[in-house]
Image: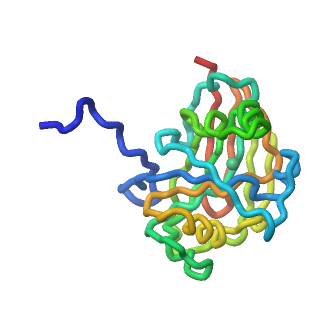
Amino acid sequence: MSEYLFSPPAIASVPIRGRSERFAVNRIFCAGRNYHAHAAEMGSSVNKGVDPPFYFTKAANTLVPSGATVAYPPGTKNYHYEMELVIALGKPGFRVSEADAHQLIYGYASGLDMTRRDIQLFAREKGRPWDLGKDFEESAVCSEVVPMPGVALERAAIALEVNGTTRQSSDIDKLIWNVREIIADLSRYYHLQAGDLIYTGTPEGVGAVVAGDHLTGRVEGVAEIALTIGPAE
Ligand code: MN
C-alpha cells in the first residue's frame, strides 16, 4: 500500500569508481568566486579575510551524468560552462575545524556548473536570487565519484576544452578558500551530511556554448568529464 499520491522522484545519485553501489546525493552546494582570476573576469574582486565566502545551491534533481547530451536550456542566450572540482562528503559534520575537515571527505569528482549567465548577471545587478541562472534542469554535471577518503586535495591541474580547444586551465592550488576551508566554513551554517556535494568554484576562462558543442574536462588525478550540448527544446 503506497503512502504517496504519486510515485516520488528517484533518489539522485552518481556512480562511484570501482564500486557497484552508487553515491546517493543529498544536497549540492556551490561556492561562488573562489579563484581570483575568475572573480576578475566577472568584474569582481575578492579580499579574503574581509569578504566571507558565499554559496548557492542546486537541487539534487539538476544532476546530469558525464557523457550526457543536454538540451540548450530555455530562457537564455548566454549559456556558460564552469569547470570545477567537486567534493563528495561521506560523513556528517557540524562546526568542523579546518584541521578536522578532511574527515568528512569520501572522495572527489569533476563537475560542470552550467549557468544561464545572462540571467545570473541580471539577478546580480538587481540584487535578486541567482536561482534562475544557476539552479535549473540539467545544470549540475558530475563525473563518477572517485574514493579518496580523508584526503584534502591541495593541488591538481583542472582543465576544460570546448570542441578540442582549451578554454580553462588552472590548478586547484589557486582556490581562494581551499578544500578544508570550504568544508569548515559551510559547516558553520549547515549540518553537513553524507551525500552532500560541494562544487568548489571555477577558474578563469568561462564562456558560452551553443548546440553541437562538445565539452571535455578533467581534474588531474580525479576524473574526466564530458558533455554535449543539444538543440533547444
Ligand atoms: Mn561555479
The image quadrant that residue 179 belongs to is: bottom right
Q: Residue at x 65, y 29 (%)?
A: 229
Q: Is residue 202 left or right of residue 56?
A: right
> Does the rendering let one see residue 211?
yes
Q: Residue at x 55, y 80 (%)?
A: 100
Residue 133 pos. (x, y %): 66, 35
Q: Residue at x 35, y 40 (%)?
A: 10
Residue 104 pos. (x, y %): 50, 71
How many numbered circles are shown? 0
Q: Which of these two is toward me, 88 or 43? A: 43
Q: Which of these two is toward me, 194 or 187? A: 187
Residue 125 pos. (x, y %): 79, 37
Question: Could you tell me which quadrant the C terminus lies in?
Answer: top right
Q: Is residue 24 above or below residue 65?
A: below
Question: Could you tell me which quadrant the N terminus lies in?
Answer: top left
The image quadrant that residue 195 belongs to is: bottom left
